[in-house]
Image (cartoon, helix red, strand yellow):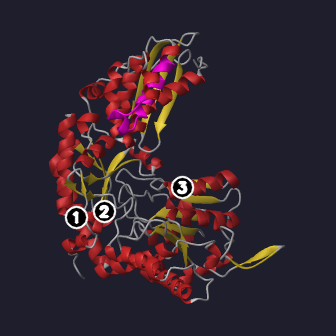
Amino acid sequence: MAGLEDLYREIILDHYRSPRNRGELPVPPAHRVEGFNPLCGDEVVLFLDLAPDGTVTDIKISGQGCSISQASTSMMSAAVKGKSVAEVRRLVRAFKALMSIHESKLEGESGDDLAAELDGVRLGDLEALQGVVKFPVRIKCATLAWNTLTQGLDEAGAPAE
Amino acid sequence: MNTLDVAAVRRDFPILAREVRGKRLVYLDSAASAQKPESVLAAMDHVYRTHYANIHRGVYTIAEETTSAYEGARARIARFVNAAEPAEIVWTRNATEAINLVAHTWGRSRLSPGDAVVLSVMEHHANIVPWQMLAAERGIELRWLPVTDDYRLDLSRLAETLDGAKLLAVTAMSNVLGTLNDIPTLVAAARAAGAAVLVDGCQYVPHLPTDVQAWGADFVAFSAHKMLGPSGIGALWARRELLEEMPCFLGGGEMIRDVRLDGFTANDVPWKFEAGTMAIVEAIGAAAACDYLDGLGLDAVRAHEVALTTYARDALASEFGAGITVFGPDEPTERGGAISFLLDGIHAHDVSQFLDEAGVCVRAGHHCAKPLMRRLGVPATSRASFYVYNDTDDVDALVAGLHTVRDFFGS
């Protein structure tokens, strides 16, 4: 049975208590995008400063919600800041792949798709969120920031790849 | 009045033998849906095992037996809420569908652009969205009774808000705050303004003796699954004269008398609102739930909940003091057994997660009442709700769980 220590790892609590990149950016030129988790009231607001080629030159976050959603937002912001759009898109896919693993795959079954997505992608702190998959109801909390980021990039016209 | 023998009641609920993560199941989410006693399960199982058939159509014996049980269940529910006659009970899938039925039939035939419907800020989405849909479709005006800082309906401008309105739609008990609303007073004010009244009885009907005639409203919606009955069945009580005038809701079999190539003739009330094969067995289960509750006595149920809610509020206050916000009226007589709360600095989701580790089930979120959440200034709350099978041990488990989560996240 999954224990809560799988979910609430120290680094997650660290990001929850001291979220990185908190604040706002002037809009325009930054893009503001909001995401909600309708089931539970988690809210993520992102301010994205994008270079013409889509590089995330700056990112600020705000919002309110559970420790998982807010920690994931903070971790996401640290991971994407300064990255090219191609790198960001790859990170998003890798994170979503991480979230879509079922328990059976964690126990050693073939994860070819995952391996392909993760190949060459360094998730760093984000690895800590892997425990979320053992608590399926919370997966939406973890992915909210990433879905909001994707929406923001698309709305801002950033390249798809 | 009987008093509730909770230990005996608990033995009637098979699911309470369940363990979660090695702990006993402490179910504090009856406001979302209630657990089912053996007698309800047995009643439904009995139908399927011995006489199940479709109703109203068959001449054969078991069809007759099931028809009789289904209509008998209608009469039973009618008695449970003191309806004047069984024909004033329309079976629906749930209370949400019951309210939608009124909006689509009474609403569409009676409300014109500019007509006003009065709601309250503490309503569940089921008693908001159907009216918003009607507003978008035909330009009716929605007005709102506000909520005071002490969690009650603000009635200071009631007459003014009702002036010229066609309908007042309001909850008898808030699913978030537990607040009990004074339905007779609201009905009197609505009548004075010439408005009809719809009462959302979802939280009230399972927990207090209900008398729709004494209330004097026009429509009351409630669900069986919150009153120990199965999921998938609810009811609309409405005055017969209104049901006679209302156009049909869903079209199909059973709700007709005659179908020709050029049109149809509707069936009599209430069957004209029950299209297709209904949740036959669930209706019979709902009647068994009425028998179980009346066996306990709703006065005893209410007294038990008042005592437990008082115990819980006292425990939360003394254990957590200023570190917890408890929403809803303090007076136990002005509220039901749903307690929404927030631990300072800890999100409701995380609270629920930790409580789950302790086997304690509470709900976290907006409870389908986002306008109320905005009014309270919070995105979400945790909610513990009590019913016939809860006892002080359950409250103690809740408190212990809250200590654990608070210790983990620190202050």
Give the mark nearer the N terminus: 3 vs 1: 3
The type of residue carrying mark 3 is: Ile
Q: Please rate how many residues cluster around mark 2, counting C-alpha atoms within 10 Å: few if below 14, some from 14 to 19, many from 20.
A: many
Q: Is residue A108 left or right of residue B282?
A: left
Residue at horizontal 24 percent and vertical 70 percent from the top: B10
Q: Secondary structure at mark 2?
A: loop
Residue holding disc 3: B128
Q: Secondary structure at mark 3?
A: loop
Q: Is residue A135 above or below residue B87?
A: above
Instruction: Tell me the distance, in whole angstroms, between the alpha carbons under discs 3 and 1.
Output: 31 Å
Residue holding disc 1: B308
Chain letter, disc 3 residue = B
Residue at horizontal 42 percent and vertical 69 percent from the top: B230
Where is residue B372? Give x, y as percent: 43, 49
Residue at horizontal 40 percent and vertical 71 percent from the top: B229
Q: Are marks 2 and 3 on the same chain?
A: yes
* Quarter occupied by residue B286: bottom left
